[in-house]
């Protein structure tokens, strides 16, 4: 059988059975080329019961990797969020203007940290001097190859607010500064409904006492 049972380490971490060598890319066909790309990918891959799958076709949305940055003021116990229109959230019963962390695409040779600091400045006017990495993850790997690096930036939110964004990128961003308790209330009542902010806030809820102890 091709199923490979790898011994678990003492901390009982489960390792994947397969890796990149267990996939054959047979063909990639461009379906759309624009700001984002869409490809049809034909592949075969090893199966748990042994052997190889038949040829499987999948449409893959090609998205630049991205960063997200949750801004937190330790002294004031406040969170800085951005509010903007999101086309993918249209057609629901709730507003398509979403509260999110500052975020941006990695579409050049910049590092995730460089993109994070640039996007924070453009979208909020803050300086993100200290960046704490929260997590790296695929938001929707069943259909999209985007890979996100998520940070927390410790900032001074004292004079933060207003409307920001780059006109040439059609950005119209309202900056919101809210006490942590209010933001947590928005999470609990379902107002906050995007994965990037949910992940960041759950992390902040865990780490907040330690961050505030550094004052």
Image: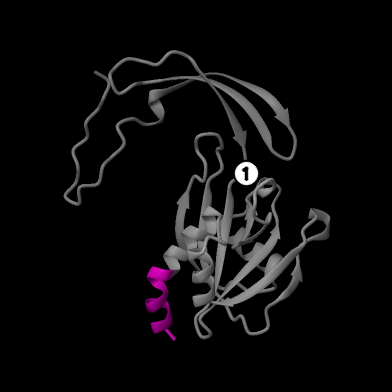
Instruction: Read off the residue under disc 1.
Output: 64
Residue shown at 56% from the left, 43% from the top: 146
Res 99 → quadrant = bottom right
- Look at 32% across and 15% down and name the residue there: 51
**Residue at left offset 75%, top offset 68%:** 164
Question: Image quadrant of residue 52?
Answer: top left
Q: Is residue 120 left or right of residue 48?
A: right
Q: Determine if residue 126 is in view.
A: yes
Residue nearest the viewer, comparing 20 with 191: 191
Main secondary structure found in the magenta portion: helix
Q: Residue at x 55, y 56 (%)?
A: 193
In the shown orientation, is residue 187 left or right of residue 108?
Answer: left
Q: Residue furthest right?
A: 168
- Residue 130 visible in rendering: no
Image spot of residue 205 (x, y percent) = 42, 70
Please provide the residue range marked out in magenta: 205-215
Residue at the left extreme?
A: 10
- Residue 184's spot in the image, x, y percent? 49, 70
In the picture, measured across the screen, residue 148 lies left or right of residue 49, that is right
Residue 214 is covered by the magenta coloring: yes
Please tell me which residue lies in front, 182 or 10: 182
Residue 36 at x, y percent in the picture? 69, 38
Left or right? Give the position of 149 relative to 173: left
């Amino acid at each position: 059988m091709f199923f490979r049972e790898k011994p678990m380490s003492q901390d009982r971490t489960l390792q994947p059975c397969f890796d990149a060598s267990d996939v054959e890319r047979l063909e990639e066909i461009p379906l759309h080329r624009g700001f984002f790309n869409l490809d049809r990918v034909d592949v075969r891959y090893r199966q748990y019961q042994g052997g190889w799958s038949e040829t499987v076709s999948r449409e893959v949305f090609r998205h630049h990797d991205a960063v997200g940055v949750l801004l937190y003021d330790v002294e004031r116990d406040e969170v800085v969020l951005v509010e903007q229109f999101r086309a993918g959230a249209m057609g629901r019963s709730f507003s398509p203007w979403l509260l999110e962390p500052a975020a941006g695409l990695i579409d050049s040779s910049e590092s995730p940290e460089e993109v994070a600091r640039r996007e924070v400045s453009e979208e909020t006017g803050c300086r993100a001097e200290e960046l704490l990495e929260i997590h790296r993850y695929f938001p929707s790997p069943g259909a999209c190859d985007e890979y996100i690096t998520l940070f927390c930036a410790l900032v001074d939110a004292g004079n933060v607010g207003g409307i920001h964004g780059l006109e040439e990128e059609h950005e119209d961003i309202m900056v919101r500064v809210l006490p942590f308790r209010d933001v947590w209330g928005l999470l609990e009542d379902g107002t906050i409904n995007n994965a990037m902010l949910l992940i960041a806030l759950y992390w902040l809820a865990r780490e907040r006492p330690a961050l505030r102890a550094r004052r």
